[in-house]
Image (cartoon, helix red, strand yellow):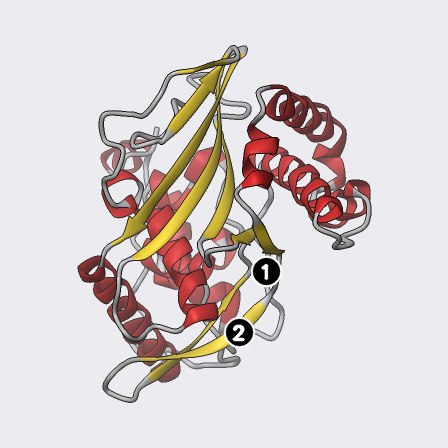
């Protein structure tokens, strides 16, 4: 349906495309329905990830002669005050173990070219059409490979296992070796990570010519009191990239025209990771759902 556009976003990004693909109405209400951007509510797992990320980046920057300042400054900027103390305790513990297992030293030895560069670029395909895309990659290795640092399972009762396809995985100081799926493209291991990393590569190296894009993940996987540190070095294939870029083009055209799909409330969309969507009070369909009887809500997956 066509909706009035009060503000057109200046660009798309991996995170905004994640919103678009989950619920176009959420994208619209957050980014197009007013001049006030509504940020995501930060979760505890995200806060822990931000703290660990800050420690890794600042330590790497010092080693290669960059200056990102002290981790505390980055943490103060990126971590919600209500979560900060708990997140710093956990994030600093994880970073200490990351160093103890030798993971930091191995990452540094691969050669870090630069860290945390924010950039918006017009990504153009072979038809001449282009989409403005913004990205903030964690870092690039000296061979031009984008690297993302991921913390999985923080604060979760069930925890998280390392992503399949790892090159190495250190647990209790022991390297489990390469996973049986080592060498498979990232899109077969984790689509969201593949979309994010290949987007960062396009921003800095361009979309064309189409080629397999080398990518890397440094994952901290937490399950209960145990932590595993997995290193993933693989690639993103051409057919997957073509589909991802086609999604960017389609979304950008719809944004320009105000062509937005109606919301379809569900727990996965409205209460993802147990956190209520930040624009739920503005969403007509969600409010209609709340007005339904408990029986009807249960049919929709709500209890």
Q: Earlier in the sequence, mark 1 or mark 2?
A: 1
- Residue 182 in percent (x, y) is at 27, 33
Q: Nearer the viewer, residue 193 or 140?
A: 140
Q: Residue placed at 55% from the left, 38% from the top? A: 107
Q: Nearer the viewer, residue 270 or 62?
A: 62
Q: Which secondary structure lies at badge 2?
A: strand
Q: Which residue is mark 1?
A: 38
Q: Residue placed at 29% from the left, 68% from the top? A: 245
Q: Is residue 48 left or right of residue 159?
A: right
Q: Nearer the viewer, residue 293 or 135?
A: 135
Q: Is residue 284 visible?
A: no
Instruction: Determine crowd level at label 2: few under 14, some 14-19, many 20+ residues with C-alpha closer than 10 A.
Output: some
Q: Which secondary structure lies at badge 1?
A: loop
Q: Residue 86 sits in which quadrant? A: top right
Residue 120, labelled with which disc?
2
Q: Residue 216 sits in which quadrant? A: top left
- Residue 156 in percent (x, y) is at 49, 22
């Amino acid at each position: 349906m066509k909706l009035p556009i009060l503000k057109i976003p200046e660009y798309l990004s991996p995170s905004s495309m994640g919103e678009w693909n989950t619920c176009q109405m959420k994208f619209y209400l957050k980014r197009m329905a007013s001049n006030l951007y509504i940020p995501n509510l930060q979760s505890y797992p995200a806060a822990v990830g931000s703290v660990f990320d800050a420690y890794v980046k600042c330590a790497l920057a010092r080693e290669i002669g960059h200056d990102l300042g002290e981790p505390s400054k980055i943490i103060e900027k990126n971590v919600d005050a209500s979560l900060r103390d708990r997140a710093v305790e956990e994030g600093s513990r994880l970073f200490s173990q990351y160093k103890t297992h030798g993971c930091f030293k191995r990452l540094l030895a691969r050669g870090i070219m630069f860290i945390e560069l924010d950039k918006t670029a017009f990504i153009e395909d072979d038809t001449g059409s282009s989409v403005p895309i913004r990205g903030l990659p964690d870092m690039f290795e000296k061979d031009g490979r984008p690297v993302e640092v991921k913390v999985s399972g923080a604060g979760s009762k069930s925890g998280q296992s390392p992503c399949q396809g790892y090159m190495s995985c250190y647990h209790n100081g022991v390297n489990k070796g390469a996973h049986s799926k080592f060498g498979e493209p990232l899109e077969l291991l984790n689509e969201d990570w593949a979309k994010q990393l290949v987007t960062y590569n396009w921003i800095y190296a361009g979309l064309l010519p189409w080629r397999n894009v080398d990518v890397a993940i440094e994952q901290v996987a937490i399950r209960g009191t145990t932590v595993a540190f997995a290193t993933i070095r693989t690639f993103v294939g051409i057919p997957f990239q073509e589909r991802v870029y086609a999604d960017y083009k389609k979304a950008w055209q719809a944004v320009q025209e105000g062509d937005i799909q109606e919301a379809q409330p569900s727990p996965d969309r409205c209460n993802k990771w147990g956190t209520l969507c930040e624009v739920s009070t503005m969403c007509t369909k969600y409010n209609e759902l709340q007005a339904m009887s408990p029986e009807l809500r249960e049919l929709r997956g709500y209890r």
